[in-house]
């Protein structure tokens, strides 16, 4: 195996989050399913933006959030994702590079505008997302930098990428290159409704070994195996993949291997402000731990710490150095 240039390279939708606080009755009026992510077109995007309250713009996207977390933890991080050469596209590129992430995907000069996600946060911290994929869905196999993939210890793919057809091809190309270079491929299932759309394909990715590591929350796991019985779903997952992590909000997480299931508690928080990005930042901590060769339990504790930081403020990216936070909490990174 050749030496690595990156600890983790993420491939995902390059999205700018537009975040606003709202009440439950606004969601009902807009016919939104609380806690879910729905895909919208440009006209719907404009209508939601006009109806929602004052908003904060923050570069986002599930895998991009994870990769920014990796960089904040001191990891060598890279990201592949498509933006347009427009105002929001420049915002995204600036933000991710400023966070210490290598980002070299050329922007699109034509076609739909840069993707954005309208994130509505209710008083209980739950987030409801409306995503206009725009330029992000034009990610193409040609955008996959084979040298960068082969030089990354872990490739991290987001389930949301499975919506656009070319992005799906890019995803499979990256996994093939990674395995050819003896690297690990991780997949986050992203969203229970995403799993509902692509259950058969996701199971095929897992069972054929296209992915080596799976991240899921409880609702995604139940959707994947079409069962309300948590233990049955966990045992099915154990048989299908080498390593999986099931996040369970305040109940912590389960690390699932062929041999055992290990429960790790959540990190304590003072106040839940916004659950956006909790799973993304958990994955960042866990992957950095793996890349550093720590045991799974320690990696999960690092993930829990990163998740705890991000849910105590608005937005899905860390507001403090996670590397310093980890050191203050006894992690040797």
Image (cartoon, grey):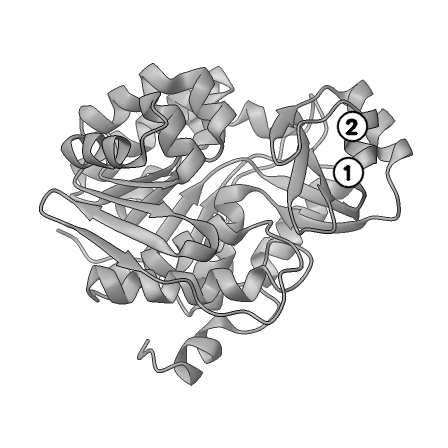
Residue 94, by quadrant, is bottom right
Horizontal and vertical percent for residue 192? 47, 29
> Outermost residue toward the front?
229
Left or right relative to 167: residue 208: left
**Residue at horizontal 59%, vertical 58%?**
317
Report which residue position mark 2 lands on.
28
- Near-viewer residue (274 or 17): 274
Horizontal and vertical percent for residue 55? 83, 48
> Outermost residue toward the left?
259
Instruction: Bin the neighbour count of mark 2 within 10 Å (Cα to Cα): few under 14, some 14-19, many 20 and up.
Output: few
Q: How many marks?
A: 2
Marks 2 and 1 in Cβ contact (< 8 Å)? yes
Left or right relative to 50: residue 212: left
Instruction: Bin the neighbour count of mark 1 within 10 Å (Cα to Cα): few under 14, some 14-19, many 20 and up.
Output: some
Residue 247 appears in view: yes
Vertical arrangement, residue 19 with respect to residue 180, above or below: below
Residue 104 appears in view: no
- Near-viewer residue (109 or 310): 310
- Near-viewer residue (73 or 325): 325
Horizontal and vertical percent for residue 12? 49, 37
Left or right relative to 86: residue 291: left
Report which residue position mark 1 lands on.
24
């Amino acid at each position: 195996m050749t030496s690595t240039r990156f600890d983790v390279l993420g491939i995902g939708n390059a999205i700018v989050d537009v975040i606003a606080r709202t009440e439950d009755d606004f969601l009902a009026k807009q016919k939104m399913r609380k806690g879910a992510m729905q895909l919208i077109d440009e006209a719907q995007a404009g209508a939601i933006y006009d109806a929602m309250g004052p908003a904060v713009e923050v570069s986002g996207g599930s895998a991009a959030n994870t990769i920014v977390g990796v960089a904040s933890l001191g990891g060598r991080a890279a990201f592949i994702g498509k933006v347009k050469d427009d105002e929001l596209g420049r915002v995204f590129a600036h933000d991710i590079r400023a966070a210490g992430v290598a980002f070299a995907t050329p922007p699109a000069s034509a076609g739909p505008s840069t993707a954005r996600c309208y994130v509505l946060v209710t008083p209980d911290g739950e987030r409801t997302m409306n995503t206009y994929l725009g330029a992000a869905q034009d990610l193409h196999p040609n955008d996959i930098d084979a040298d960068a993939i082969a030089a990354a210890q872990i490739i991290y793919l987001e389930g949301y990428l499975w919506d656009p057809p070319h992005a799906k091809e890019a995803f499979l190309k990256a996994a093939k290159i990674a395995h050819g270079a003896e690297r690990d491929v991780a997949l986050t299932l992203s969203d229970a409704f995403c799993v509902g759309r692509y259950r058969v394909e996701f199971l095929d990715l897992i069972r054929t070994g296209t992915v080596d590591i799976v991240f899921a929350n409880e609702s995604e796991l139940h959707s994947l195996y079409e069962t309300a019985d948590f233990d049955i779903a966990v045992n099915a997952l154990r048989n299908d993949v080498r390593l999986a992590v099931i996040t369970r909000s305040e109940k912590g997480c389960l690390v699932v291997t062929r041999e055992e299931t290990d429960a790790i508690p959540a990190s304590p928080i003072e106040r839940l402000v916004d659950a956006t990005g909790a799973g993304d930042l958990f994955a960042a901590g866990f992957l950095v731990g793996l890349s550093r060769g720590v045991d799974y339990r320690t990696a999960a504790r690092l993930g829990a710490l990163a998740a705890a930081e991000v849910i105590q403020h608005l937005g899905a990216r860390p507001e403090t150095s996670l590397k310093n936070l980890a050191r203050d909490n006894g992690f040797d990174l």
